[in-house]
Amino acid sequence: MEQHRKKDPKSTFAAVQKAVTYLLLTIWAVIVLFPFYWMVLTSLKDYGAYNAEHTPSFFTLAPTLENYRNAFTTVPLMGYLLNTLIFTVITTALMLFVITLAAYAFARLNFRGKDLVFTLFLSLMMIPTELVIITNFATITNLKLRNTFAGLVLPSVTSVFYIYLLKENFEQVPDELYRAAKVDGTSDLKYLWKVMIPICRPTLITVTILKIIECWNSYAWPRLITDDPSYFLVSNGIQEIRENGFGRENIPAMMAAVVVISLPLIVLFFLFRKKIMAGVSQGGIKG
């Protein structure tokens, strides 16, 4: 009994600590998820009912899907979604090809000045994004690629951060595998395809998902390089919806469009959230 009583304070402290932790996590979850709840709730409110609210209502007794119908009929939202899908698929595929070869070269190949070149690559991360956008805009304009998918895609086909992440992951693969493959006469490209990529698949999946999210949310560059609605992406389409579609007053209709645009990314994240965390952990641990 005495031993049991001595353990009680520690057990009580652990229980209180656990309860406080869950309470704080719950509060944080409510803060993070509330904007999404408010977005969906607003999209389900009737335009007249929304404007008649003197104080915001946290629920609605008469939900409507009329706002979602307007999102697809008032402006070409489906066209924006298709443009974004094409842009995302092409950009992600090209980027994976480029960063995989670059990361493999820095991780496994020996050539003069490799460390210097890689250091210069990393230094590019210190350059402000605004300066890069200005340079890219001048280049794309001089090449007469404005209002084209090529102009949208080309500045995004590589990433210094993803090259660094993948290089660190490649370096975790034992050198013995590489030497054994070379003894068997395996080429570097075959070794990369048959050995490195399967082993580092979690990191590649993570990079793919993060790039998809980045492309889907891209705003500044598409807005700068395209003024033809035929090439608008969903993020640019929101502004066009606000100005020329529903007007500044119809907030429920705008929220319906935002829900439609956000849904693919939300589904993607929930389907692959474990792979994202596994890939980031694998890419950041050396040993």
Image (cartoon, rainbow, N blue to C red):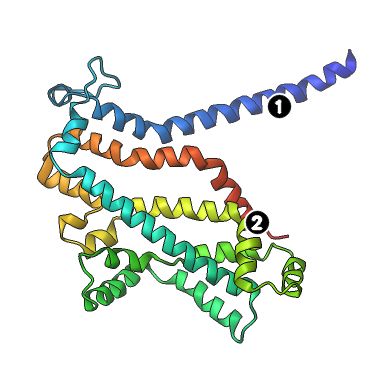
Residue furthest out toward the front? 185
Does residue 101 sit above or below 241 in this rendering? below
| Relative side of 66 to 122, left or right | left
Query: Residue at point 12% right, 42% down?
Result: 245
Query: Residue at point 23% right, 48% down?
Result: 80
Q: Quadrant of the C terminus?
A: bottom right
Q: Which mark is residue 42?
A: none
Mark 2 lies on a secondary structure that is helix
Does residue 104 sit above or below 38 in this rendering? below
Q: Classify mark 1: residues with Cα within 10 Å, few (<14), some (14-19) or many (20+).
A: few
- The amino acid on which the numbered mark 1 sits, given as a three-letter code, is Ala
Does residue 278 sit above or below 200 in this rendering? above
Does residue 73 sit above or below 141 in this rendering? above
Residue 226 visible to the viewer = yes
Q: Which residue is mark 2?
A: 199
Q: Position of residue 75 (x, y in %)?
A: 14, 43
| Relative side of 202 to 6, left or right | left
Which residue occupies the foreground of this view, 22 or 212?
Answer: 212
Q: Classify mark 2: residues with Cα within 10 Å, few (<14), some (14-19) or many (20+).
A: some
* Mark 2 → mark 1, Cα distance in angstroms: 40 Å
Q: Position of residue 167 (x, y in %)?
A: 59, 66
Q: Position of residue 146 (x, y in %)?
A: 21, 68
Mark 1 lies on a secondary structure that is helix
Examine the image and state in which quarter residue 170 appears: bottom right
Examine the image and state in which quarter residue 138 appears: bottom left
Looking at the rendered structure, the number of numbered marks drawn on it comes to 2
Q: Which mark is residue 14?
A: 1
- The amino acid on which the numbered mark 2 sits, given as a three-letter code, is Ile
